[in-house]
């Protein structure tokens, strides 16, 4: 497989913004969980982050990037985006809203740019891993670079 065939929308956006990243691929027929992905790839759990998509009371969509072992605090998440409340986007709507499949969803390069909040725990890390934009791919980059590419801010959004 050539390098060109591996390019995802997220990778193209990072390259367009001249943001350095590395990628890691692994065998993946079906998404199980972020923890399973970290174990499959031998990555330390504390460096792997998952991307969650929510819908606010107003009907707007929001993206949250949190550690794979953490749980999104819906009240804190709503406060972070100035909503009364947010709820998880139903799995069946992920592809329609984001352009990505479940398990391959990343905050970079969605169909539309949604307000994005990265958990503040990422701020203290040198580099983190996020989904690469398709099943079987992880991207390694600096948290500040993720924020720049996704137009994200840091926030306290986990329990």
Image (spheres, helix red, strand yellow):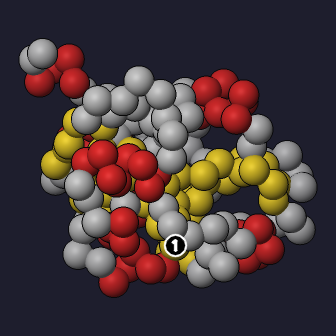
Residue in front for this viewpoint, 45 or 14? 45
**Vertical position of residue 72 compared to residue 90: above or below:** below
**Vertical position of residue 54 compared to residue 137: above or below:** below
Q: Is residue 33 left or right of residue 17?
A: right
* Extreme residue toward the left, this view: 2
**Vertical position of residue 3 compared to residue 155: above or below:** above
Q: Residue at x 89, y 68 (%)?
A: 84
Residue in front for this viewpoint, 44 or 5? 44
Q: Which residue has dot 1 on it?
A: 119
The image position of residue 159, as x and y in percent, is 66, 79
Q: Residue at x 20, y 42 (%)?
A: 24
Residue 57 image-quadrant placement: bottom right
Residue 150 appears in the picture as rendered: no
Q: Is residue 84 left or right of residue 129?
A: right
Q: Residue at x 25, y 48 (%)?
A: 41
Residue 89 image-quadrant placement: top right
- Quarter of the image where the N terminus is located: top left
The image position of residue 50, as x and y in percent, is 49, 55
**Vertical position of residue 16 compared to residue 60: above or below:** above
């Amino acid at each position: 497989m050539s390098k060109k065939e591996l390019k995802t929308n997220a990778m193209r956006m990072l390259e367009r913004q001249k943001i350095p990243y590395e990628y890691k691929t692994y065998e993946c027929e079906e998404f199980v969980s972020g923890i399973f992905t970290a174990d499959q790839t031998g990555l330390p759990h504390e460096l792997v982050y998952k991307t969650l998509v929510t819908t606010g009371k107003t009907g707007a969509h929001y993206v949250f990037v949190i550690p794979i072992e953490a749980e999104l605090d819906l009240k804190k998440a709503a406060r972070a985006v100035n909503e009364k409340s947010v709820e998880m986007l139903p799995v069946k709507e992920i592809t329609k809203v984001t352009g990505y499949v479940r398990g391959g969803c990343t905050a970079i390069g969605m169909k539309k740019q949604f307000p994005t909040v990265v958990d503040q725990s990422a701020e203290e890390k040198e580099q983190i891993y996020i989904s690469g934009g398709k099943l079987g791919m992880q991207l390694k980059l600096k948290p500040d670079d993720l924020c720049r590419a996704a137009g994200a801010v840091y926030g306290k959004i986990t329990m």
